[in-house]
Image (tube, rainbow, N blue to C red):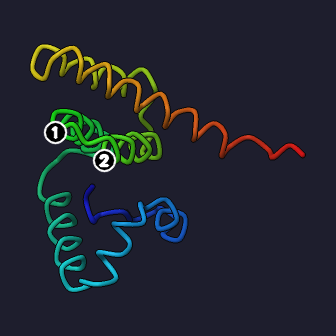
């Protein structure tokens, strides 16, 4: 997972609550590394013409190709926040099938489904 968990226009506190515990512990122990990583991420995002939605769709493919569940789910969430639809995210995942293989594609699709469900639960009013 990238250290870049915040973007302009997002709720930083909400993003920090979603970080895995090991990531939080690493950042706490090595704040200078986290800050440097964040700076690089911001610089890379600002270099080209791609908008945030497209960047997140690409990062889904990269995370999927690397077999990283947490990063895939994180980028699915962030792609949704940037305006990507479920269909666009699923297509980004399916595009990797001939490159990374059927099993990894199915795994990434299942991770995305888990994230979609989690997002739906967070948006729905709590029931007692």
**x%, y% of residue 58?**
21, 37
**Image disc number at residue 66:** 1
Badge 2 local density, few (<14 within 10 Å), some, or many (20+)? some
Q: Residue at x 27, y 65 (%)?
A: 3
Give the quarter of the image for residue 124. top right
Is tag 1's residue or tag 2's residue first in the polypeptide sequence? 1
**x%, y% of residue 60?**
27, 37
Query: Where 79 falls versus 18 (above or below)?
Result: above
- Secondary structure of residue under mark 1: helix
Marks 1/2: CA distance? 9 Å
Q: Which residue is mark 2?
A: 71
Q: Residue at x 27, y 55 (%)?
A: 1
Q: Residue at x 57, y 33 (%)?
A: 117
Horizontal arrangement in the rendering, residue 47 relative to residue 74 (left or right):
left
Horizontal arrangement in the rendering, residue 72 relative to residue 42 (left or right):
right
Query: Where 17 falls versus 73 (above or below)?
Result: below
Horizontal arrangement in the rendering, residue 108 relative to residue 102 (left or right):
right
- Decide which of 109, 84 is in the foreground and name it: 109
Q: Residue at x 13, y 23 (%)?
A: 100
**x%, y% of residue 22?**
35, 66
**x%, y% of residue 80?**
45, 40
Q: Are marks 1 and 2 in contact (CB under 8 Å)?
A: yes
- Secondary structure of residue under mark 2: helix
């Amino acid at each position: 997972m990238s250290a870049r968990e915040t973007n302009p226009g997002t709720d930083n506190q909400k993003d920090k609550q979603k970080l895995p515990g090991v990531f939080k512990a690493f950042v706490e122990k090595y704040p200078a590394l986290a800050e440097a990583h964040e700076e690089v991420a911001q610089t890379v995002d600002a270099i080209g013409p791609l908008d945030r939605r497209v960047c997140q769709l690409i990062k889904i493919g990269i995370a999927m190709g690397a077999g990283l569940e947490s990063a895939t789910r994180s980028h699915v969430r962030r792609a949704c926040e940037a305006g990507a639809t479920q269909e666009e995210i699923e297509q980004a995942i399916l595009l990797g099938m001939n490159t990374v293989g059927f099993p990894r594609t199915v795994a990434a699709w299942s991770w995305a489904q888990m994230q979609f469900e989690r997002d739906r639960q967070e948006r729905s009013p709590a029931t007692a």
